[in-house]
């Protein structure tokens, strides 16, 4: 079995005309949400063997804050190809994952991350799939399980959505 964790970066500062999108950092809510989702991942043993992280400042910051919740930081690869990537590019990148990686985390951007999640999922809890279809919010985490044992076997509709959470959904669940 293989497990894929897709995490959209946390809430970032607004894009300013003349600014560089790649350089945007997290806003205060984003920093809090990244820590929250990291704590959730650690608490629920959603610990990746490897993290692929877009080179954008906001994804790097999201991972740094989330990874702080783990006892041992997972192997991390800064992946330029995740920045502004479409679903097919992300799909191709995931298929190149080494065989020894059982749980892979990819931290990136919409719409590509959301689109690849929808491309990969064929089954799972109906309510979670419906929420995911509506969109992937900042700090949204989709956990997708695959029955195969080699990432090269990745194909559309191969996965089962195990869960889909965000800091907001976690907050609503504890109210």
Image: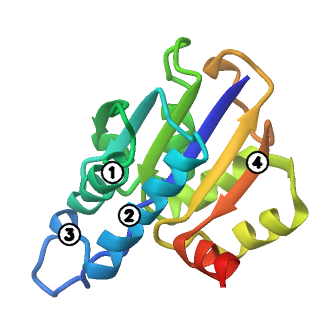
Question: Number of numbered discs present?
Answer: 4
- SS type, badge 1: helix
Question: With 126 as the anchor, is 100 left or right in this view?
Answer: left
Farthest residue, direction top: 100
- From the image, which quarter does the C terminus lie in? bottom right
Instruction: Answer whether labels 1 and 3 touch (C-beta < 8 Å).
Output: no
Image point (40%, 36%), residue name: 51
Can you identify the residue that label 2 sits on?
Answer: 34
Image point (37%, 53%), residue name: 66
**Residue 114: mark:** none
Image point (50%, 22%), residue name: 96
Q: Residues within 10 Å of mark 4 (few under 14, many from 20)?
A: some
Separation (CA) of disc 2 from disc 1: 7 Å
Question: With 53 as the anchor, is 154 left or right in this view?
Answer: right
Instruction: Answer whether labels 4 and 1 touch (C-beta < 8 Å).
Output: no
- SS type, badge 4: strand
Separation (CA) of disc 4 from disc 2: 20 Å
Q: Position of residue 108 (x, y in %)?
A: 42, 54
Can you identify the residue that label 4 sits on?
Answer: 162
**Residue 25: mark:** 3
Q: Position of residue 117 (x, y in %)?
A: 65, 52
State which mark lies toward you, 1 or 3. Answer: 1
State which mark lies toward you, 2 or 3. Answer: 2
Can you identify the residue that label 1 sits on?
Answer: 63
Question: With 110 as the anchor, is 19 left or right in this view?
Answer: left
Separation (CA) of disc 4 from disc 1: 21 Å
Q: Which of marks 4 and 3 precedes in the sequence?
A: 3
- SS type, badge 3: loop
- SS type, badge 2: helix
Image point (66%, 16%), residue name: 150
């Amino acid at each position: 079995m293989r497990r894929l964790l897709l995490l959209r970066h946390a809430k970032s500062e607004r894009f300013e005309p003349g600014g560089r999108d790649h350089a945007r950092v997290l806003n205060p809510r984003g920093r809090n949400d990244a820590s929250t989702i990291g704590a959730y991942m650690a608490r629920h043993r959603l610990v990746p063997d490897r993290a692929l992280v877009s080179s954008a400042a906001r994804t790097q910051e999201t991972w740094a804050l989330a990874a702080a919740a783990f006892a041992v930081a997972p192997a991390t690869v800064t992946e330029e190809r995740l920045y502004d990537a479409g679903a097919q590019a992300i799909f191709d990148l995931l298929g190149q994952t080494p065989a020894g990686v059982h749980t892979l985390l990819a931290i990136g951007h919409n719409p590509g991350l959301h689109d690849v999640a929808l491309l990969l999922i064929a089954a799972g809890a109906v309510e979670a799939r419906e929420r995911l279809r509506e969109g992937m919010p900042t700090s949204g985490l989709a956990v997708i399980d695959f029955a195969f044992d080699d990432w090269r076997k990745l194909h559309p509709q191969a996965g089962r959505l195990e869960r889909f959470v965000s800091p907001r959904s976690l907050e609503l669940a504890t109210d």
